[in-house]
Amino acid sequence: MNKQNISKLKMFLMGISQRNKENKDFFIRLEVDFKSGTKVFSGIGEDEVGKYKFNFKGKSDIYTFDELLENISEEARNYEAIKFRYVERGTTVIIEGDDKKVTVKYKDQEESVPNIDEFTSTKIKNRDYFVKVGQANDLLKEIGVLTKDGKIKNDKIRKYNQIDHFVELIDGLLKEIEFKDSITVLDCACGKSYLSFVLNYYIKEVLKKKCYFVGIDYSDTVIKASKKMADNLGYKNMEFIKEDLTNYTPNRKVDLVVSLHACDIATDMAIGLGIRAKSKAIVVVPCCHKELLGQYSSEVMEPIIKHGVYKARFADLLTDGMRTLMLEAKGYDTSVVEYISPLDTPKNLMIRAIKKSDSDEKSMAQYQELKNRFNVEPTLEKLVK
C-alpha cells in the first residue's frame, strides 16, 4: 500500500483505538487479512489478560492495543491490500484498504441470522420475540433454552416466554430513562442470573447501549454458576458478589435495580437497596409473602379473613400495596402489571417504579394509615433508611 493510504489507514485505526478504550468490556477479537496477489496472510488478535495476543504467520506476540494497531499498520506497507475487522458484541467495524482507497463500514452482527429449523419455528410462531432465536442463540444455549444444535427445548418454551416477556415489560422503561454513557443494572438475589444475562444481551446488542451488571446473592453456588456462564459467553461487563443485600453498598451509580421472585422480605431488601442507592428505576416481581401474614389484624375484615386462604391472599395484596406506596412516598412513579399468567404461578405481579421526585408526603401518610389500621410493621420501612 502507498504512503498516502497507509496514513489514512492509521487515521481509521486511531478511531478503533478510541473505540476500544470506551468499549473494552465488549471487545471479542480483531481479524486482519493482508493480500499480495492471490495470497492472503491472516492474523487474529485476542484479549490476553489486559494485553492482546496477535497470531500471525505461525507466531504469537503480546502487545498493548495501540502497539498492536501500530504493528498492523506497519505490516500493511508490505502488502497490496488489507481487510481489518474489529469485532465487539453486537457490531463489527470493517476497514478495507489498497492503493486506490481506504474505507470503513459498520455491520450489526444480527444481519447474519442462521435459519430457524421448522420445529423451533412452530414453537415460537405466535410471538414477536425481543430476544430472538437465531440472533441470540449463544445466550439461549447457555441459559438452557436451546439445545446445542439450536433447537428449542420442549420443557423450556415457558421459561423462554417468561424471560422475553420481562424484557418486553421493561423495554419502555429502559427507553424512558435518560442515561448518560452507560446503564448500570443491579440484580438483587440474582440466583443463576438468567435475567441479567438476557437484559445484558438486549441492552448491548439490540438497543446498542453500553451497560454494566452487578449480581448479588448470598449463595456461593449460584455466584460461581453465574461467573462461569459470564465467562462462557464472554460477557466481561458483569460481576457477581456474595453478599447480604442489607449490607451491600454499590461502588458505582445504579440506574436500574431488578429482582425476580426474591422470597418474602428479600424483595423488600431489593427495594430498600434501590431506594438507598437512588436508583433511577426499580423493577421487582415479588414472591412468597410471609411477613405480614402473621402480623396483620382487622375487626372489620374478620368475617372474611377467618378463612385461611382469604387471609393469605389479602396479606399478599397488603404487602405489595404497601411496597408500592413506599416507593411512591420516596418519589417514584409506580405501575403494577401482571407479569405472567396466574396459571403458571399466582406470584405473577410486577411492580415498576421510575424516580420522578424527592418525595411524596400524601403517599407516606397513606402508608402510615395502613400500618396503623392493620397493626403491621413492615421490614421495608427500616431498609429504606
Image: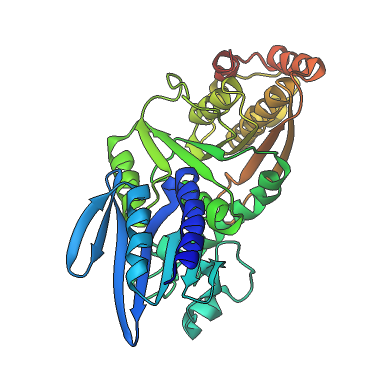
Judge left or right: residue 207 versus residue 7: right
Quadrant location, the C terminus: top right
Q: Which residue appears at 65% of the width and 18% of the height?
A: 297
Q: Residue placed farthest to the right in the image?
A: 362
- Viewer-closest of 84 and 277: 84
Picture coordinates of residue 32 (x, y %)?
Answer: 36, 68
Quadrant location, the N terminus: bottom left
- Viewer-closest of 37 and 372: 37
Picture coordinates of residue 64 (x, y %)?
Answer: 31, 46
Picture coordinates of residue 162 (x, y %)?
Answer: 55, 56
- Viewer-closest of 218 and 204: 204
Picture coordinates of residue 272 (x, y %)?
Answer: 56, 23
Residue 135 sits above or below residue 339 on the image: below
Judge left or right: residue 368 versus residue 203: right
Specify whether residue 306 is in view: no
Residue 177 sits above or below residue 235 on the image: above
- Viewer-closest of 265 and 343: 265
Q: Which residue appears at 30% of the width and 64% of the height?
A: 44
